[in-house]
Amino acid sequence: MASTPVMGTPEEAEARERVAFADAALALAGHEVTDPYLNKLAALQARGDLSADEARRLGRRYLIGR
């Protein structure tokens, strides 16, 4: 019996859509985030595992040490 692939929960799908929207907005402005850590922060925020303030604080600390 073949198993069907799991597409994830509706919450995961919504988080992927949020990240895709942000990526598209950045692309329209001529930007792209390629850093794996910053992309991970964006994914965590999109899933609701990290607040926007916390993601910003961690990203700033990562980039400029503050």
Image (cartoon, rainbow, N blue to C red):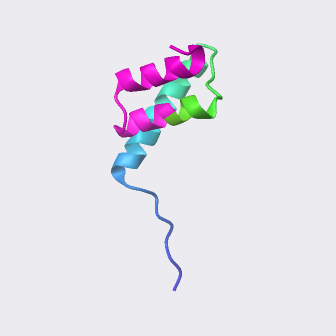
Quarter of the figure with residue 62: top right
Quarter of the figure with residue 34: top right
Rendering coords of residue 40 (x, y %): 52, 36
Rendering coords of residue 29 (x, y %): 58, 13
Q: Is residue 40 above or below residue 6?
A: above
Is residue 54 rendered magenta in the image? yes
For residue 34, side relative to residue 62 (left or right): right
Is residue 7 rendered magenta in the image? no
For residue 44, side relative to residue 23 (left or right): left
Give the residue drawn at x 40%, y 35%: 46
Q: How many marks?
A: 0
Q: Is residue 25 above or below residue 8?
A: above
Rendering coords of residue 31 (x, y %): 62, 17
| Outermost residue, front side | 65
Rendering coords of residue 14 (x, y %): 38, 42
Give the residue drawn at x 49%, y 71%: 4
* Magenta-tinted stretch: 41-66
Give the residue drawn at x 36%, y 39%: 49
Q: In this view, does 7 lie above or below 61?
A: below
Q: Is the magenta stretch mostly helix, strand or loop?
A: helix
Compare residues 47 and 18 and report the one nearer the observer.
47
For residue 33, side relative to residue 58 (left or right): right
Quarter of the figure with residue 47: top left
Q: In this view, does 13 lie above or below 32?
A: below
Compare residues 44 and 5 and report the one nearer the observer.
44
